[in-house]
Image (cartoon, grey):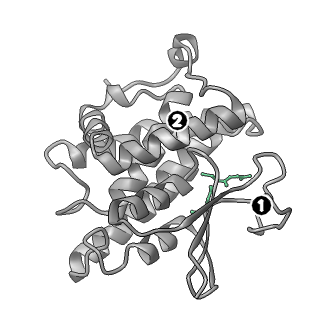
Amino acid sequence: MKRMKLFISPLACSMATRTALEEIGRPAEYVQIDHDTRLAPDGAAIHPLGMVPVLHTDEGRVLTENAAILQFVAAGTPLVPDEPWQRTLLHRWLSFIGTELHKAVFIPLLDPKAPDGAKAYARGNAHARLAVANDHLAHREYLLEGYSVADIYLFTVLNWAQATPLCVSDYAGLAAFFERMKARPAVARVLAAEMEAFAVERGPLKSATPSTRADYPRPA
Ligand SMILES: N[C@@H](CCC(=O)N[C@@H](CS)C(=O)NCC(=O)O)C(=O)O
């Protein structure tokens, strides 16, 4: 049997699967792709769009898409609830985070290739979408009844805010959630490892400056 292999890039959305694996104590081999070529260290192309995450399962199957990978690796553990309504809510939050936050807000803000119009569009999208998650978390510890892979994905995405004009601290529910997540030993271990790998690959993470934040529409 082959060993599960996860292709990653430091601090990218692949960090969510790595964190889920760390939380459940499931071993995997982590392979960092080249940031510029988007190829594996042996030169192999691993994703048709050059993206991470990509999972090679123990049986040698290949799986892409963060939401699917998260549910696959943590299936049968409390991180992926079986109860039908909780499972439905898990899909709901994974879809919301993947489309409304990850792609509609953070990717255009973070991608140096995104034109100014795309960045402005993303800034315009941000507040209403962050407010949905913030309001939901105002009186809850986690997105579902218990801790799940959706929380891990949300944490991974919110961690990008420091490199954008967005301020998680503007949103009390999200800020408390973010601190709660960072206090989890598995989350802290993976975050520290990926911060270090990011710095080795691309230098220390550059935070947004107050002037880049000045034109960002803040919550009232
Ligand atoms: N739909 C994909 C999106 C994955 C994605 O956006 N990955 C980013 C990192 S967070 C990436 O690899 N981007 C590199 C690129 O677009 O060249 C998924 O959910 O897995």
Instruction: From the image, tell me which residue sits under label 2.
Output: 124
- Above or below, comparing residue 100 to residue 89 in the picture: above
Q: Position of residue 154 (x, y in %)?
A: 40, 50
Residue 73 as seen in the image, left or right of residue 7 = left
* Quarter placement of the N terminus: bottom right
Q: Earlier in the sequence, mark 1 or mark 2?
A: 1
Q: Residue at x 51, y 42 (%)?
A: 193
Q: Is mark 2 within 8 Å of ligand 1?
A: no
Q: Residue at x 31, y 81 (%)?
A: 76
Q: Position of residue 54 (x, y in %)?
A: 63, 68
- Above or below, comparing residue 109 to residue 136 in the picture: above
Instruction: From the image, tell me which residue sits under label 1.
Output: 40
* Quarter placement of the C terminus: top left
Q: Residue 33, located in which quarter of the rendered image?
A: bottom right
Q: Is residue 135 visible?
A: yes
Badge 2 marks a residue whose secondary structure is helix
Q: Residue at x 27, y 40 (%)?
A: 183
Please name whichever residue, 89 or 67, is drawn nearer the observer in this view of the structure: 67
Please name whichever residue, 22 or 115, is drawn nearer the observer in this view of the structure: 22
Classify 10 Å Cα crowding around label 1: few (below 14), some (14-19), many (20 and above): some
Q: Position of residue 49 (x, y in %)?
A: 76, 63
Ligand 1 lies in quarter: bottom right
Q: Position of residue 146 (x, y in %)?
A: 19, 62
Badge 1 marks a residue whose secondary structure is loop
Q: Is mark 1 within 8 Å of ligand 1?
A: no
Q: Are marks 1 and 2 in contact (CB under 8 Å)?
A: no
Q: Amino acid at mark 2?
A: Gly
- Above or below, comparing residue 36 to residue 26 in the picture: above
Q: Is residue 117 visible?
A: no
